[in-house]
Image (cartoon, rainbow, N blue to C red):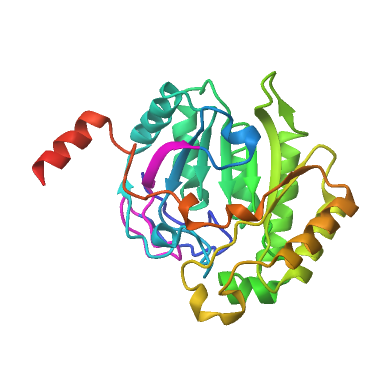
């Protein structure tokens, strides 16, 4: 697969991306690069369920969040295997065969074209989740319309100064807000099966950053005023300093109990429906290993291990 003029994300680099190389902001070629594909149990309850979410972690990113828990693959791009569209579809099928409740595409934006082609190869028997930082172009989301069952975007900031400082994205706010509304339009209100697993809908996530409760409250206010009925909100307290957070003293710590309660109480005041994460989730033990698990069929992995 090749991209002649890439505008998949709001960076709008316009560069050519060959199969395995590219000079755009994400630094990736057009073929998807996968760091891990395995059952994951630490998403919202209606996504992970009892059997786990079939999570595919993609390498590279159109954001550069200094605090990213997946910094190893998102920014440093240390781990990842390039796969063809047909191989990506095979990864989806293997996760379904393992009992995954859904196929969960983590950080998919810069590979959206290839993902769309993989999904078109055959209708999956489980929902497809698009799990992104919320920094999207509407044109990219529109090529996914009808292919994605559940959108799981972040809305990180209500202030572009913060977005520029911590994620290198001075136009994040307007792009993310427009994206959230488009995602909600595509999926409509949340739908669940008899076991409480989400089958369709949008959940907007917001991660509380230390020292930035005003930003969180402003994000929640916008969600309360603009979200269509039936779109859920997930308030996350899992922040733990990762990546380059040590370079920014004000965010080089976990959030306090006072910060957590202040934002949580505002969420309740707005009567937003969704999920609240416990502060105990702020642990690096919940960050998965990025070791190419599930990228290849097991027999191929065994051969590769034997050859080392």
Q: Is residue 171 left or right of residue 9?
A: right
Compare residues 160 and 142 and report the one nearer the observer: 160
Q: Position of residue 227 (x, y in %)?
A: 82, 47
Compare residues 74 and 234 and report the one nearer the observer: 234
Label count reads 0
Q: Is residue 237 left or right of residue 308?
A: right
Residue in view at x 38 percent, y 27 percent: 94
Residue in view at x 57 percent, y 34 percent: 48
Compare residues 306 and 94 and report the one nearer the observer: 306
Q: Residue furthest left?
A: 307
Is there any visible trace of residue 148 in the rendered image? no
Q: Is residue 206 left or right of residue 272?
A: left
Q: Position of residue 164 (x, y in %)?
A: 61, 74
Compare residues 94 and 266 and report the one nearer the observer: 266
Q: Can residue 98 be found in the magenta stretch?
A: no
Q: Position of residue 199 (x, y in %)?
A: 65, 27
Q: Position of residue 236 (x, y in %)?
A: 66, 54
Is there any visible trace of residue 47 in the rendered image? yes
Magenta span: chief secondary structure? loop
Residue in view at x 74 percent, y 41 percent: 184
Give the vertical position of 212 relative to 121 (above or below).
Answer: below
Residue in view at x 16 percent, y 41 percent: 305
Give the vertical position of 169 relative to 191 (above or below).
Answer: below
Give the vertical position of 282 relative to 100 (above or below).
Answer: below
Give the vertical position of 230 relative to 213 (above or below).
Answer: above
**Magenta-drawn segment:** 18-40
């Amino acid at each position: 697969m090749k991209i002649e003029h890439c505008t998949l994300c709001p960076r709008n680099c316009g560069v050519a991306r060959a199969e395995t190389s590219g000079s755009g902001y994400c630094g990736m070629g057009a073929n998807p690069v996968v760091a891990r594909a395995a059952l994951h149990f630490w998403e919202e309850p209606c996504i992970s369920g009892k059997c786990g979410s079939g999570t595919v972690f993609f390498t590279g990113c159109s954001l550069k969040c200094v605090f990213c828990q997946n910094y190893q693959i998102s920014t440093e791009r240390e781990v990842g295997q390039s796969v063809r569209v047909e191989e990506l579809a095979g990864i989806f099928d293997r996760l379904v065969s393992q009992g995954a409740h859904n196929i969960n595409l983590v950080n998919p934006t810069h590979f959206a074209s290839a993902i769309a082609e993989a999904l078109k190869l055959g209708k999956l028997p489980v929902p497809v989740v698009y799990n992104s930082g919320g920094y999207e172009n509407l044109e990219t989301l529109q090529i996914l319309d009808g292919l994605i069952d559940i959108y799981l975007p972040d809305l990180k900031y209500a202030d572009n100064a913060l977005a520029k400082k911590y994620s290198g994205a001075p136009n994040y706010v307007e792009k993310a807000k427009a994206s959230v509304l488009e995602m909600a339009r595509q999926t409509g209100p949340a739908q669940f099966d008899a076991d409480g697993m989400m089958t369709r809908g949008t959940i907007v996530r917001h991660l509380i950053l230390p020292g930035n409760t005003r930003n969180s409250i402003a994000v929640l206010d916008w969600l309360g005023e603009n979200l269509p009925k039936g779109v859920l909100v997930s308030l996350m307290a899992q922040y733990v300093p990762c990546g380059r957070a040590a370079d920014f003293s004000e965010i080089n710590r976990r959030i306090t109990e006072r910060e957590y309660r202040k934002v949580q109480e505002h969420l309740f005041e707005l009567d937003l429906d969704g999920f609240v994460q416990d502060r105990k989730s702020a642990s690096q033990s919940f960050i998965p290993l990025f070791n190419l698990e599930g990228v290849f069929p097991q027999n191929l992995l065994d051969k590769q291990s034997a050859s080392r």
